[in-house]
Amino acid sequence: MPAPGPPRTVTPLSIGGSIRNFDAWSSNRLQTLPISVLKDAVVGIDAGNYLKKIIDGPGTKEPLVPALGGFPFSLRNKIEDDLSQWHQAGIKPLFVFSGIQFLRTDKASSTSEVAAKNRSVAWQLYDIGHATQAVEAFGDSGSLQPVEVYRFLRQILVENNVEFQVAPYAAWAQLVYLERHPKQFIDAIFGPAEVFFYDVDKVITGFSFARSSFSCLNKKAIMQDLGGLNHEQFIDACILSGFDFCPTLPILEKQNSSLFKTCLDFLKTCRSATGIVNQYSESPAIKDSGYLDKYRRARLAIKHQPILTDEGYIEPMSIDDAPGDMHEFMGNRLPEEVYFYLSRGVIGSSVLDMIVSGELHELPPLDAGENESYRVFLEGLQTVRAQSLALLSQPLQHWWNSRKISVIYWYDKPNPRVVTYKDLSAGLYESTSSWNVKESVFATALAAHPGNSLLGFAITGLTDKDLAAKTYTTKSNENLLKTTNEVVLNVFWRTLRLREFIDKDHLLTPWGKVLSTALGTLDHNDELEEACYLGIELLKAKMLRADPNTLNQYSGRDADRRYCSLISRVASLGKLRHNSIGYTGPLSRTLLTYNSIIRLMSKNLENLMQMVLTSLLMNGDADRNDRVDWKQIGLAIPFVEDINAGLGIAVKTYLDELTNTEDPTSYETRLKIQKEQLIPQMFVQSVDVMADVGKAFRLWDAIMSGIKAAPEGLIQDAPKFAEADAWLKARRPVS
């Protein structure tokens, strides 16, 4: 556990959650208590609510995250500091993450589209030099959703020996179960307002370590201020106000400051949400909205919210009177085994969300999604999505294989694309089932592999044809995959087979040789294996190339711009080391667009690997009994942390500054730009910007080595890479 930093308020003290206007209504009802009250207590924490407070909270929010992509630079330090402060106070945290998303509404889509428009305005301000207003506009535009940070938070929790679990659906319901259980697994809940849907006395809303206190909200105090309304009517008020699983009552959508109070006042006269909707049934806003059905589904979902019991079963909160048609408001139920892997953090919920809901809503990316190349790439991902769904459905009941998933794009909502995977389901698993490689086969070779990187070894190890031949293995029920390395490596090999880097005979394909050569060129101390793999995937997808439509954002002649565009895109795959503070420095909308493409590719590859892992486990290819490494297996899947465009921007800035001089290739010019604080002053909070630029160029060298190893005709843009490489050689930093 790291030593705590200076005491601070861990989060905004208001309760948070998705119930509109409840924060404002309840803020003057908060109670403050000394933190010593919680000594030796186990506090259950809603991970999503906690992350949202950090990401968006006053004093902790980093306004340029929407302009840069990735995660806030201070996020890790803030989380680790909070863990240290809790430890010092004698508090044991137990984080609970939300699982499958249910009751989809248009809220996420509409909110995201408004945010995208706000970011477009921010970019316009930036382009005309109104930096201060642009920063404010970016900060107000919203971007990062807590679910995007879940794996990163889990990694930090595992590193600090802090327990977590993933709820089958809503974390707030799981927390209530843990507190109300006869064994009382937790002593208190630090969570959102949704916890009050249930019979809970108090909810912790925030900590102020500087004052050695915490704030909480008392259910009794809330009920006393309802003017005689009962608990069921309180729930109605929350739903009518609008929350994650039900929109606001349409006639109240434009209300903000007094929305929750207005809902309470309505209920004092109409007594129920149904009565209110019926009274205003002829209102144009309500008449064709289907609101009553949405309300009823939300009401049922709250009452019968599924939770994971201490015995490992998935059961409704009110199991005694649960209806037989829960699938109507919760989606179809998956097998218990899938929920188990979800609960341990072995897999995420993205593919599960798709198959349960039958929908995938594609929301605009950070750059607002106006770039045509992004949309073309987005629609070209149907194959990898179908593979992920097929791998998940193959070991399930046959019904799941015939599901059709509607992909709804924000720019073409009336015309959803349909993903089908029925024809893939059986054959896809069979094509990977010859990978059951035991540690006795690969242990010696892995030990000799620089850095012991499993991802790098999975591809470079197969250059040894003797080892490749030994990897062709059938499943032995008496000798299943057991160790963490065995499970993870076989997942990587199976994935690389599906991605066509390895053929059916376990030999490298031409693209496999490109990837192997590139990875083999890296210095393992640079930790660039994931970036290099992702770069070759993008190259294979014809998405690692200069964008002719954005060359006006670079300096110099057309050739200079093309080369800088291509090189800075490769650099965008790497990581800019930065102090634990908000970013200050140049921005680039074109590289933010490319960051969105990188993220799209990495998330779909992450999903595919997780479903390969699920397929391996559910088909009984690994020993599933008494494992204690579930969390480690889940975190071994790459792409835990989203990268930002920072390193790409640093490389672009360095090359543009050279281009703007009279002699960009001279020793003196390069020395001046890198040594006389020109670039370091532009990236004042970076740890060592020029060292990172050098690392980016080593990543470029690795990818170039792969391109040079490709057979003629495999990589259409190979000559353009060669030209850019020759141009770059004379512009490298002075060593």
Image (cartoon, grey):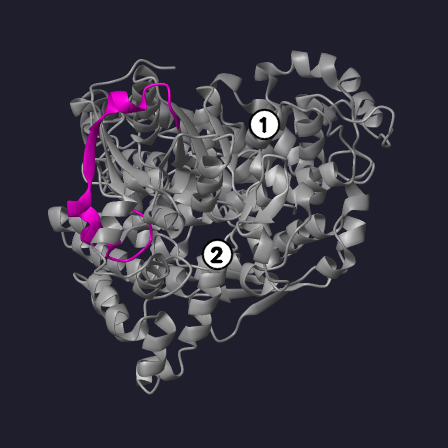
x then y, percent, for residue 455: 61, 28
Magenta-span inclusion, residue 33: yes
**Residue linked to disc 2:** 303
Considering the numbered disc 2 on the image, is that residue within a helix, a strand or a loop?
helix
Instruction: Look at the image and say whether residue 571 sits in the magenta stretch.
Output: no
At 50% across and 46% down in the image, what residue appears? 544
Of the two numbered discs 2 and 1 on the same chain, state the one appearing first in sequence. 2
Is residue 647 visible to the viewer in this orientation of the structure?
yes
Q: Position of residue 163 (x, y in %)?
A: 48, 26
Q: Nearer the viewer, residue 669 or 114?
A: 114
Report helix, strand or loop for mark 1.
helix
The stretch in magenta equals: 16-42
Q: Is residue 717 visible?
A: no
Indicate the amino acid at tag 1. Leu
From the image, which quarter does the C terminus lie in?
top left
- What label sits on residue 635 in the rendered view? none
Residue at mark 1? 519
**480 vs 362: above or below:** above
Label 1 neighbour load within 10 Å: few <14, some 14-19, many 20+: many
Q: Nearer the viewer, residue 504 or 387?
A: 387
Q: Is residue 459 above or below residue 3?
A: below
Quadrant of the snapshot with the N terminus: top left
Residue depicted at x 53% and y 19%:
524
